Amino acid sequence: MARTRHLPAEERKELTVRAVVELCGEQDPARITTASIAERMKVTQGALFRHFTGKDEIWQAVMAWIAEQVMQRLEKAVARAETPLATLEAMFMAHIRFIIEHPGVPRLMLGQLQHAEPTSAQQLVRSMLARYRERLAAILEKGRASGELRADLDIEAAATQFVGTVQGLVVQSLIDGDVARVAEQAPGAFLLYQRGIQAGEGS
């Protein structure tokens, strides 16, 4: 078996994370072993454990990477948009694009949240979702204050519905076995969401 060249520790860790994300797109994350990760990377398990103390630490690194990537994409989307409603749409579509590019991520996140016992990776998922909702709430507040969104808008409910709409599309795509379909369904789903929060739409 060919061996990868010697790499700095941080670069090796990132390659490990990307390998796990790829594997999650191909199989049930719960069935991924350190042996399968090492095989994907063309290294020995011993080499893998020079950078991680165990599988739990690998999952933690993967979730930290996902959280960073998602939030970076959302912030870029926010920076380009001109109005609160345009910002929400940009965030929605940026999240959808990330899922399409990394179809294993939803499986991994759902799996982590289902653990009965708290894990570091699970805490990272919850922390990311909390940051996500805080960002949404700030944008929704701005939209309500500017008059672009309904004056009677329930900010917490609107933030929950936004996240739930994304999650609903993802879960349906997993049931269908076709994550790419999310791209087709996302614009219509966001339009329905928009009609519920926009000023003048039934208010």
Image (tube, rainbow, N blue to C red):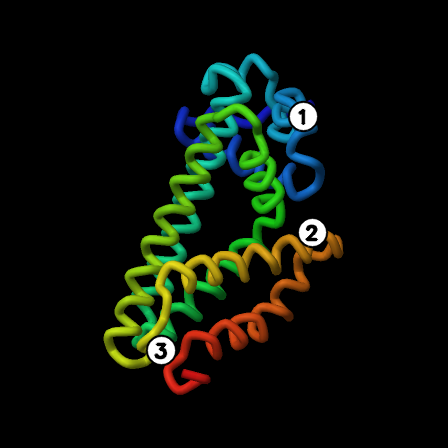
**Residue 23 falls in which quadrant of the image?**
top right
Is the residue under label 1 in contact with that under label 3 (CB below 8 Å)?
A: no
Q: Amino acid at mark 1?
A: Ser
Mark closer to the observer (3, 1): 3
Mark closer to the observer (2, 3): 3
Q: Work out whether 168 lies above or below 193.
A: above
Left or right: where does residue 44 sit relative to residue 90?
right
In the picture of the structure, the residue carrying the numbered disc 3 is 150
Separation of marks 2 and 1 at Cα, in angstroms: 23 Å
Classify 10 Å Cα crowding around label 1: few (below 14), some (14-19), many (20 and above).
some
Q: Work out whether 167 lies above or below 34.
A: below
Q: Amino acid at mark 3?
A: Arg
The residue positioned 53% from the left and 38% from the top of the image is 18
Q: Residue furthest top?
A: 46
In the picture of the structure, the residue carrying the numbered disc 2 is 174
Q: Nearer the viewer, residue 189 or 197?
A: 197
Separation of marks 2 and 3 at Cα, in angstroms: 33 Å
Image location of residue 14, percent across then percent down: 46, 34
In the picture of the structure, the residue carrying the numbered disc 1 is 36
Image location of residue 152, percent across then percent down: 34, 74
Q: Quadrant of the C terminus?
A: bottom left
Q: Nearer the viewer, residue 10 or 118?
A: 118
Q: Amino acid at mark 2?
A: Leu
Element type at marker 3?
loop
